[in-house]
Image (cartoon, rainbow, N blue to C red):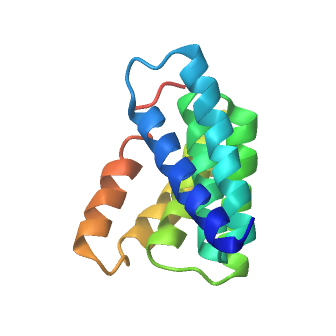
Amino acid sequence: MDQTVHRQMGIELFNLTWDLMEKPDRTQAETDRMINAAHASRYHWEIASEAVNIARGEWQISRVYSVVGRAEPCLYHAERCLQVTLENNLVDFDLAFAYEAMARACHPAGDPMETARFMTLAEDAGGKIQSQEDRDYFFRELNTIEAEPD
């Protein structure tokens, strides 16, 4: 497969994962497909793209595990997202969402101090997002963390 095919697969699988995440009446088979699609998307991004797409793929995998209530893989992929983000000096939207992923992962992992720390980092980074539309979207997403059950 050439890089163009890997890139297209990364996009299609990312979008499929997002559609399944937002589906309120998802079946178990669809949940399994969502998890597998997120990992497959991340794989294709690694081959075809740049660090920003790898970080976003790790973010999406972490979010998927948050949605299905699996704290350990959620935290692992949030940590990978943050690591790739920091190692590659990604800023703006990507830095804010890396901190959001960590806050979202620490919450179900039962670590209120780390949740609070990463919420603060996320809020600070989110306030620096250049695009007002992206900034508004980020804070809507960040505010859903508190609404999630422990």
State which quadrant residue 38 falls in: top right
Q: Is residue 16 above or below residue 125?
A: above
Query: How far from the left and from the top, in percent, is residue 23?
Result: 39, 28
| Count of numbered circles in the view | 0
Percent from the top left, x then y, of residue 37?
Answer: 62, 41
Q: Is residue 148 visible?
A: yes
**From what the image shows, is residue 6 above or below residue 23?**
below
Please identify the quarter of the rendering in which residue 109 is found. Answer: top right
On the question of residue 112 being in view, the answer is: no
Residue found farthest to the front: 1
Q: Quadrant of residue 49?
A: bottom right
Taking the image as shown, residue 63 lies to the left or right of residue 86, namely left
Which residue is at a point 70% across and 46% down the rendered structure image?
39
Residue 21 % position (x, y) = 47, 35
> What residue is shown at x 40% (from left), y 17% (from top)?
25
- Image quadrant where one finds the N terminus: bottom right
Name the residue: 63% across, 84% down.
89
* Image coords of residue 22 (percent x, y): 39, 34
Front-lying residue, 31 or 112: 31
43 and 7: which is toward the camera: 7
In the picture, which quadrant includes the C terminus?
top right
Classify residue 36 as left or right of residue 119. right
Q: Residue at x 55, y 23 (%)?
A: 30
Left or right: where does residue 131 sit relative to residue 31? left
- Which residue is at the front of the view, 117 or 45? 45
